[in-house]
């Protein structure tokens, strides 16, 4: 198989990259170890920055996001039994969209396949070769057991947090930054109507809770738990009691819970995001804790920069933008890390939190919510900073 860019990972980053490259007349082949069905069904992130929506709509991936997604003009921060609204349009003139990641993936897969893209699902044993040469290759085994080799000019590693592409970079050539957090989220999906128009981020004495949504009929909610929590330890009745207690003052609409999961919190950055002709993007290069919903949005921002750099290379042979890719992408990544860390630490109690620390956090929440500058700071980050490149 011969192509210009070999892409490992058919998540939001890999598929959007393939799409943007195609628009610039650059060929790509995408492989993924999962099946199309798995990719389109796995329920993950839910919030798209305004800019992310603009990319999907503006480059022709999806107008469904405008019809079926829900524009959210704010969030509520709750503490000490009171809600405080952050009004995004009033503060920064932008909003966010609630549109689940698997819907983004359905749109991306459909639009790529309609354009005749070569996507190989259920590709196992992927290996990268020759990243430091001018002729890198990817080998893999297809669903029928046949081995293939992709010969390309560049490899994009968009294969998520367990990235094999990242692991192909020798330890000596990369620096890993990592932080674990002493708590996790218990997440549920349930059949119920939304309990509120907007998301509620609640810092309660019993711990954090987030009331999110997926659709008119499916809701996503989370509450902070110890890292060793097992889903089996929580009956539905116990979950509802805990959620209700943590959003003190809001009446949650309950319904049958059909999925329970425990999400560990970690922050991770791989420096560099480039090794010869291998370029990492999205979760393959960085992970944020979920609070603030930056993960998928950062992946999209990486890909814009990478597609622009590859476009310049094929246009005029210049490697200047490719050489700048990691620095440009990492600047936004660290801003995203900071925001996710800040939201997380402001809203969660650590297990060893002292009474002083708790009151200080409430003081921080008071400061942010009572000041227009504070609310604006939050709204700018939540709705997404301007992109570094056009598209
Ligand atoms: C969701 C997750 C988040 O971390 C967040 O800040 C907002 C929404 C969600 O999964 O719905």
Image (cartoon, helix red, strand yellow):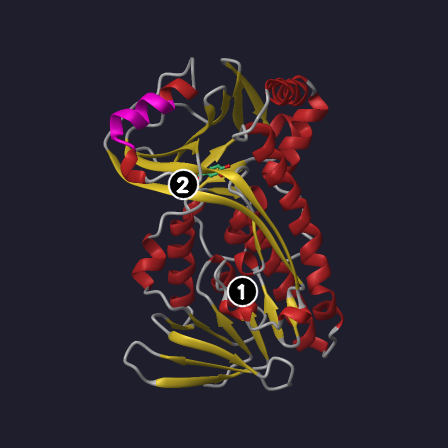
Binning the other alpha carbons within 10 Å of mark 2 as few (below 14), some (14 to 19) or many (20 upward) gives: few
Image x and y of residue 344, in percent: 57, 35
Residue mark closest to the camera, 2 vs 1: 2
Where disc 2 sits, the SS reads loop
Q: Reading the chain from its start, which is encountered first: label 2 or label 1?
A: 1
Where disc 1 sits, the SS reads helix
Image x and y of residue 379, in percent: 63, 32
Residue closer to the observer: 355 or 109: 355
Read off the residue under disc 1: 17
Residue range of the region highlighted in magenta in the rendering: 234-243
The answer to whether any part of residue 153 appears in the image is yes
Image x and y of residue 214, in percent: 37, 38
Tell me the quarter of the image containing the C terminus: bottom right
Residue at 66% over, 42% down: 338
Read off the residue under disc 2: 228
Tell me the quarter of the image containing the N terminus: bottom left
Residue at 54% over, 46% down: 266
Mark 2 and mark 1: span between their CA atoms? 37 Å
Tell me if residue 129 comes above or below residue 389 in the rendering. below
Question: Which of the 4 image quarters holds residue 186?
Answer: top left
Left or right: where 264 falls relative to 342? left
Image x and y of residue 89, in percent: 60, 29
Beta carbon of the mark 2 residue lies under 8 A of ligand 1: no
Residue closer to the observer: 36 or 344: 344
Tell whether position 239 is magenta. yes
Q: Main secondary structure of the magenta part?
A: helix
């Amino acid at each position: 198989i011969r192509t210009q860019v070999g892409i490992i990972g058919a998540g939001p980053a890999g598929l959007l990259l393939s799409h943007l490259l195609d628009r610039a007349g650059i060929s790509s082949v995408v492989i993924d170890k999962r099946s199309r069905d798995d990719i389109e069904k796995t329920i993950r992130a839910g919030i798209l920055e305004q800019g992310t929506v603009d990319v999907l709509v503006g480059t022709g991936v999806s107008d469904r996001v405008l019809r079926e997604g829900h524009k959210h003009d704010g969030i509520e921060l709750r503490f000490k039994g009171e809600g405080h609204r952050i009004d995004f349009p009033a503060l920064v003139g932008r909003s966010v969209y609630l549109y689940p990641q698997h819907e983004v993936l359905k749109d991306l897969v459909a639009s790529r396949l309609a354009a005749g893209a070569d996507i190989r699902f259920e590709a196992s044993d992927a290996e990268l070769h020759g990243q430091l040469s001018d002729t890198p290759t990817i080998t893999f085994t297809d669903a029928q057991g046949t081995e293939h080799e992709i010969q390309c000019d560049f490899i994009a590693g968009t294969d998520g947090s367990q990235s094999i592409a990242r692991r192909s970079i020798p330890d000596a050539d990369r620096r890993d930054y990592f932080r674990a957090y002493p708590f996790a989220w218990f997440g549920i999906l349930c059949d119920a109507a939304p309990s509120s128009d907007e998301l509620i981020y609640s810092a309660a004495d019993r711990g954090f809770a987030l009331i999110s949504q997926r659709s008119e009929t499916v809701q996503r909610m989370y509450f902070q738990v110890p890292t060793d929590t097992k889903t089996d330890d929580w009956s539905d009745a116990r979950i509802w009691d805990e959620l209700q207690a943590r959003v003190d003052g809001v009446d949650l609409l309950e319904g049958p819970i059909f999925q329970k999961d425990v999400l560990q919190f970690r922050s991770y950055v791989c420096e560099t995001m480039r090794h010869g002709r291998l370029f990492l993007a999205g979760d393959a290069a960085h992970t944020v804790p979920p609070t603030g919903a930056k993960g998928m949005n950062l992946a999209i921002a990486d890909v814009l920069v990478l597609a622009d750099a590859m476009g310049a290379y094929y246009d005029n042979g210049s490697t200047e933008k490719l050489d700048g890719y990691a620095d440009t992408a990492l600047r936004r990544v660290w801003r995203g890390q900071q925001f996710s860390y800040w939201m997380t630490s402001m809203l969660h109690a650590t297990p060893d939190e002292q009474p002083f620390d708790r009151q200080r956090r409430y003081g921080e929440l008071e400061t942010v919510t009572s000041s227009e500058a504070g609310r604006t700071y939050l709204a700018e980050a939540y709705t997404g900073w301007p992109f570094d490149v056009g598209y």
